[in-house]
Image (cartoon, rainbow, N blue to C red):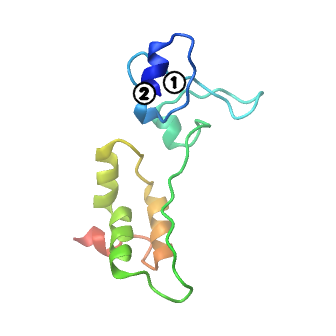
Amino acid sequence: MPQAVAADPAAIGFTALGHLVPGVRAIAVAREADAPFHEPTYENVARAAYPLSRVFYLVVARKPGERLAAALDAFARFLLSREGQGTVLAQAVFLPLRAAQAGEARQLLGAPAGRCAADAQ
């Protein structure tokens, strides 16, 4: 889709910011008609000020009172570790979580808010 938009000067399309190609530009948008417009910058997306930014969730099925399967638990903890968030940053597709967000997510897994086992490795 980005290539088709780039080839047609009258085209309008919708894609993730990570999929922009030469000849396509992202535009500033506002949440409401009387709200300020925000450019699609890294900072505005990271602060969720850009209205078309979104959060990516990892949802797991866990029965109340039971632990996750060991492999799934290890994967989720890795994603929430410093190393895992460094990998997210290096891939340049998604923005890494803020430390507080990762801590809150680790609490949902039953790990301490500050650090998890994957951080110590």
Image quarter for residue 32? top right
For the point 34% across and 41% down, the residue is 92
For the point 46% across and 76% down, the residue is 109
Q: Is residue 44 above or below residue 104?
A: above
Q: Element type at marker 1?
A: loop
Q: Distance of mark 2 from mark 1, alpha carbons?
A: 8 Å
Q: Is residue 104 visible?
A: yes
Residue extending farthest right: 34
Task: Find out whether the residues at labels 2 and 1 contact each other: C-beta distance under 8 Å.
Answer: yes
Amino acid of disc 2 = Leu
Residue 85 in picture, x, y percent from top left: 34, 56
Label 2 or label 1, whichever comes before in sequence order: 2
Q: Which residue is tagged 2? A: 20
Residue extending farthest top: 9
Q: Is residue 59 above or below residue 44?
A: below
The mark found on residue 26 in the picture is 1
Q: Report whether 69 appears left or right of 5.
A: left
Image quarter for residue 28? top right
